[in-house]
């Protein structure tokens, strides 16, 4: 298989997987969240601090000062 076909195959798979993730995250109630370091992009060097759903791993927003302090204390 040539590179072009292989890349196309992988992009198709990636799209399918991203769609499945989006559907799962949409169906989640985000009942439990924790403060986590996440990467904005796969290639971004510095992680950022956010609330992340414990179940579906959706990024839910900026943590408040108290939770941020607790996170860095641990
Ligand atoms: Zn969730």
Image: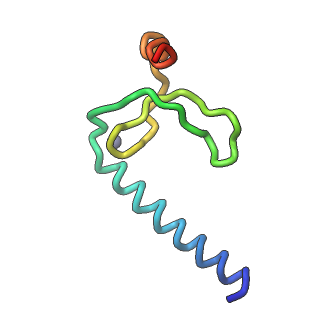
Q: Position of residue 20 (x, y in %)?
A: 40, 62
Give whichever of 36, 4 is nearer the camera.
36
72 up-or-down from 5: above or below: above
Residue beneath the point at 54% across and 66% down: 14
Q: Position of residue 24 (x, y in %)?
A: 34, 54
Q: Which quadrant would the N terminus be assigned to in this image? A: bottom right
Tell me which colouring the rendered structure shows: rainbow
Residue beneath the point at 59% across and 30% down: 48
Q: Which of the 4 quarters of the picture holds residue 19?
A: bottom left
Q: Position of residue 46 (x, y in %)?
A: 67, 33
Q: Which quadrant would the C terminus be assigned to in this image? A: top left
Residue located farthest toward the right when viewing the structure as drawn: 3
Quadrant containing ligand 1:
top left
Total marks in image: 0
Residue beneath the point at 54% across and 36% down: 38
22 up-or-down from 70: above or below: below
Q: Which of the 4 quarters of the picture holds residue 54?
A: top left
Residue located farthest toward the front when viewing the structure as drawn: 74
Residue beneath the point at 48% across and 12% down: 69
Left or right: where does residue 68 sit relative to residue 2? Answer: left
28 up-or-down from 4: above or below: above
Left or right: where does residue 56 sit relative to residue 29? Answer: right
């Amino acid at each position: 298989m040539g590179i072009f076909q292989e890349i196309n195959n992988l992009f198709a798979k990636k799209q399918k997987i991203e769609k499945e993730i989006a559907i799962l995250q949409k169906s989640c109630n985000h009942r439990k969240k924790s403060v986590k370091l996440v990467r904005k992009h796969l290639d971004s060097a510095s992680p950022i601090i956010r609330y992340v759903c414990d179940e579906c791993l959706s990024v839910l927003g900026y943590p408040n000062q108290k939770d941020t302090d607790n996170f860095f204390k641990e």
